[in-house]
Amino acid sequence: MKKTIIVANWKMNPTTLREAKTIFLGIKKQAVKLKKIKTIICPPAVYFGELKRISSKDKILLGAQNCFEQERGPWTGKISPKMLKTSGAKFIILGHSENRKAGENDEIINQKIKLALKSDLNVILCVGEFERDEDGRYFDFLKQQILNALVGVNKNYLKNILIAYEPIWAIGKNAKEIITNIQLQEIVIFIKKILVDKYNVNDFKDVKILYGGSVNHKNIEDLNKTNADGFLVGRDSLNVEKFGKILKVVNDN
Ligand code: PGA
């Protein structure tokens, strides 16, 4: 059965392990009942051990929010993808705009992707333009971001990569506006075509595109009518009730 992927990006929240467990258990209670959803929760990595212990195997999967681009060594404070993998992560978000803003460039993101895939993690690669211009230059920007991130990434890994389209103008509480279904559908096809061309795959179904940026319990019903293969949720993923509603709406439609 085709499952819709819903990723919770908790970012640097919540501030205590106790709260993390409460939210996690609240989400788990609802997620285990839903057959058509694949729920991936990306908490701060320090909570992995405890959350893995209370997770329902195969029902809720854990994802990391970033990693360092080296395997080991004298890198104080850094965490490698293999460490995340052995601590319970199955997925990893890479290239998030908040990390790009903090200095990550395409080259570093590419190194991280290759190391994460080698470490047996599935990659959720975030891409997205700052703004939309009338000439459509954001299409080239997006294409370049994707191709740069995937330099040297072998076709065999395509099944381990999800692309999350997160236009910066639509993310977070300062979002200018919400994407329309037509805008989203067009981008999903555009990104699929980039991957189909690069990897010479026959079927659009072999590439999975998520949408992220102000997805919430109110607009999910509408966004779910598009061709996106799933959603990446920030703010609403920390609220059990709101996130539960998102999961249920997607499951039931
Ligand atoms: P948001 O965040 O849902 O709060 O807009 C999404 C993200 O940054 O991944």
Image (tube, rainbow, N blue to C red):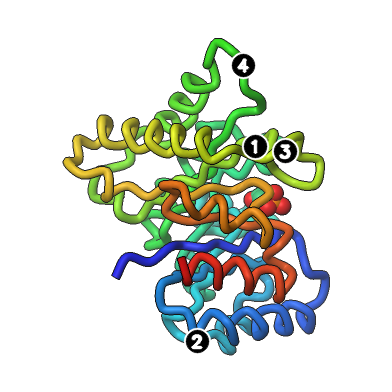
- Asked whether mark 3 and ligand 1 are closer than 8 Å, the reply comes as no
Measured in 3D between alpha carbons, the distance from the residue under mark 3 to the one under mark 4, in whole angstroms, is 24 Å
Residue 87 or residue 212, whichever sits in front: 212
146 over 144 or under it: above or below:
below
**Residue drawn at (67%, 35%), measured in percent from left and top?**
168
Read off the residue under disc 1. 100
- Asked whether mark 1 and ligand 1 are closer than 8 Å, the reply comes as no
| Whether label 1 touches label 4, CB < 8 Å | no
Measured in 3D between alpha carbons, the distance from the residue under mark 1 to the one under mark 4, in whole angstroms, is 21 Å
Residue type, numbered disc 1: Arg
Mark 1 vs mark 2, foreground winner is 2
**Residue drawn at (23%, 50%), measured in percent from left and top?**
156
Measured in 3D between alpha carbons, the distance from the residue under mark 1 to the one under mark 3, in whole angstroms, is 5 Å
80 over 155 or under it: above or below:
below
- Tag on residue 133? 4
Mark 3 vs mark 4, foreground winner is 4
Is residue 83 something that shows in the picture?
A: no
Residue 63 or residue 137, whichever sits in front: 137
Read off the residue under disc 2. 56
> In the structure shown, which secondary structural element does the residue marked by tag 3 occupy?
loop
- Tag on residue 102? 3
- The quarter of the picture where residue 57 lies is bottom left
Measured in 3D between alpha carbons, the distance from the residue under mark 4 to the one under mark 2, in whole angstroms, is 45 Å
